[in-house]
Image: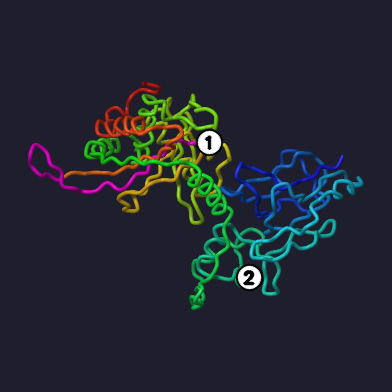
Amino acid sequence: MASRVVMPKLTDTMEEGVLLAWKKREGDSVQAGEALAEIETDKAVMDLEAFASGILRKILVQQGATVTSGTLIGVIGGADEDITSALTNKIAAAPSVTGGAKASAPPAAGSAPAAPASPEGTRVIASPRAKALAAERGIDLSTIAGSGPGGRIVEDDLVKVQPPPTPTLQAGTDQPLSQMRKAIVKATTQSKAPVPHFYLTSEIDMEQAERFRDQFKQNRTTHPSVTDLLIKAAAIALTRHPNINVSFTGTAIRRHASIDIGIAVGLDDGLITPVIRNCGLKSLDDIVRESRGLIDRARDKRLQPQEYTDATFSISNLGMFDVENFIAVLIPPQAASIAVGATRDAPVVKDGAVKAGRRMKVTLSCDHRALDGVQGANFLKEFKRILEHPSELLLPKGTP
């Protein structure tokens, strides 16, 4: 029986995806579980796997097309099978294509997917990073010769290209929203408008934490980043203040059994928050190793949906950009999120004398439907105390 291949809904926020590349041609044999195509979602680049074995009989959406989730993009069937019924209820409207072009007609049986772009105007095949860089610099990808597989344009192909003069139009130029930016627009709009935020700011003495980190570097093959220290400190504080590790459901306050901390990672075209699961049961060494892998995959857009969804608490650190203080927008289901600024030299009064100190400002964003000021303040006080006494960061796994 013919099997319909549709643009999947790979995440809760995904409404459309970009078909970056077909990995099979019409007429190719396909096994269930085998990668059929490469899809760019709102957060990552992922493989679309076949749900059935057979022959890829028809390709209905070409490489580079942006289509809504649920759109029929291909059909798998037997070599001599009548696939008419699988095609009859496909979406009639032509899906849009990145750059404003229309989706071309499906290729004839046995033909290859669309070729790389050329001066004659055929469709451009480029990596997501190359597209983002081209849009940022105003470069026409159809003028670039790709060095990637099948002539695909990659980021390195654009490095030496001279961008065109900046347009002088009074209204400026419009840059189409990436899939990731569309998801950010939707998530933040749904959060900031209906969720009653309140914010609590505290200043933390980071001298001992910095010494702790320096000692850690000398004694271990792997050493923690400042963000790793923050994750472990937050995990301990959340273990001691479980009323912060909650979500507002509309009719109840859900207390999460697991402490799942998201760490905001900035990308060229947006933001993604990989999640470290069960942080309350992990040592600092565990967190260091796991955060490295998640951040690397996030930057390469290779995270799986389960790796960046459903954090119960999140940390956003802009200290490395010399930002002194900021506030974070809550992303449901989280009821609390902490924003971290840079550690700075600051004058500090100790025992009646002014001395040089190292200070870091943090701001806790809270959902007032689930949390009150005293609850947030108690958590923040404990978070601060742990960082000012960093030997606690070496507590065994699961220690309250």
Type of secondary structure dominating the magenta stretch: strand
Residue at left offset 62%, top offset 51%: 40
Residue at left offset 18%, top offset 44%: 357
Q: Position of residue 326 (x, y in %)?
A: 35, 49
The image quarter containing residue 209 is top left
Q: Magenta segment: does it hold 353?
A: yes
In the picture of the structure, the residue carrying the numbered disc 2 is 142
Residue at left offset 69%, top offset 58%: 65
Q: Position of residue 92 (x, y in %)?
A: 80, 55
Q: In this view, which residue lies farthest toward the left?
A: 352
Q: Along the line of sight, which residue is nearer the eye, 388 or 38? A: 388
Q: Along the line of sight, which residue is nearer the eye, 197 or 338? A: 197
Compared to 270, does 144 lie above or below?
below
In the picture of the structure, the residue carrying the numbered disc 1 is 310
Q: Give the Cα separation between the discs numbered 1 and 2.
A: 39 Å
Compared to 273, does 98 lie above or below?
below
Along the horizontal axis of the image, is 252 left or right of 226? Answer: right
Along the horizontal axis of the image, is 193 left or right of 21? Answer: left
Label 1: element kind: loop
The part of the chain drawn in magenta is: 333-356
Q: Position of residue 168 (x, y in %)?
A: 49, 78
Q: Quarter of the image containing the C terminus? A: top left
Say which amino acid is labelled 1: Asp
Q: Magenta segment: does it hold 16?
A: no
Q: Residues within 10 Å of mark 1 (few under 14, many from 20)?
A: some
Along the horizontal axis of the image, is 94 left or right of 370? Answer: right
